Image: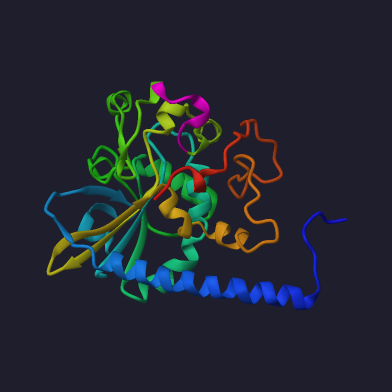
Amino acid sequence: MTKHMTGTRQQWLAARLALLKDEKELTRRSDEIARRRQELPWVRIDKEYRFETERGSALLTDLFRGRSQLLVYHFMFGPDYAAGCPACSAIADGFDGFVAHLANHDVTLAAVSRAPLAKLQAYKRRMGWTFPWASSFGGDFNSDFSVGFTEEQQCEGIEYNYRREEPLAKIPSSLTPDGAAAIAAMSGTDVATYTRERPGMSAFALEDGVVYHTYSTFSRGLDGLWGMYQWLDRAPKGRNETGIWWRRRDEYGEHCDAQAVNVRGASAAGQI
């Protein structure tokens, strides 16, 4: 028998109507926050970034694919990873369905990672994805947008999500970002190497041949892009997390050697 509070249909309706009032307020607040994002000052980008794509070598302007807006997901896939981050993979599972809609609204959605293009393409085939995915291998793009770091920077303490982190050596292993021990193992690397990459998304505008950086968000700021969590937030038991429970979608049902870490999960690892 359930331990959850039960009640009559009338009691449920009264509670639901009270919740509806707060839900409506939340949507209005969300609209206001979206407006403020769009009011941020644009920052002109004069640096020449180069990428490798399935279409060949490309500049940042080429990633727009003829449109005026570009949304980049900074996918955690470092040069020394054996496979893409499973958390980023869960987010990216939703991209293909959105790409066509966004493209027909003057917006290109693409992923960028530091791994060489051949690695990205092999993983993309494995996962069955078709969205654009560019390699920034050897360039400054990830570093300049605060999602790629060096070993030396880790030792000094990096700047991520608009705050400074303690040097990696001073952070207890159980508190490394995003419960990193388990996910690092799932990515085929160690914690230090894994956490030199970080997740994020950045928005860009292209006007008169000039690219502008308009917005970036990281950590818990990506929560709204993680489609499965939006569904779980409406499920009877919510997120119901006690560790790193998700896998790449082709791994469910298989034995996984990675130990679950007792954290709330990557979605709650930071604060916006």
Q: Confirm whether residue 104 shows in the render.
A: yes
Quadrant in which the N terminus appears: bottom right
Residue 3 quadrant:
bottom right
Viewer-side residue, 180 vs 83: 180
Task: Report whether 161 appears left or right of 253.
Answer: left
- Range of the magenta residues? 170-177
Q: Give the residue at the far top of this rendering.
A: 169
Q: Is residue 74 shown above or below 205? A: above
Q: Quadrant of residue 115?
A: top left
Residue 95, percent from left and from top: 46, 61
Query: Which sits in the foreground, 47 or 220?
Result: 220
Q: How is the image coloured?
A: rainbow
- Tag count: 0
Q: Is residue 65 visible?
A: no
At 39% from the left and 72% from the top, the residue drawn is 31
Residue 79 position in % (x across, y down): 37, 34
Residue 30 % position (x, y): 42, 68
Instruction: Assess whether residue 156 is covered by the magenta stretch.
Output: no
Is residue 208 found left or right of 246 in the rendered image?
left
Placement of 111 over or under 210, stated as above or below: above
Asked if residue 175 lies in the magenta stretch, the reply is: yes
Magenta part mainly helix, strand or loop? Answer: helix
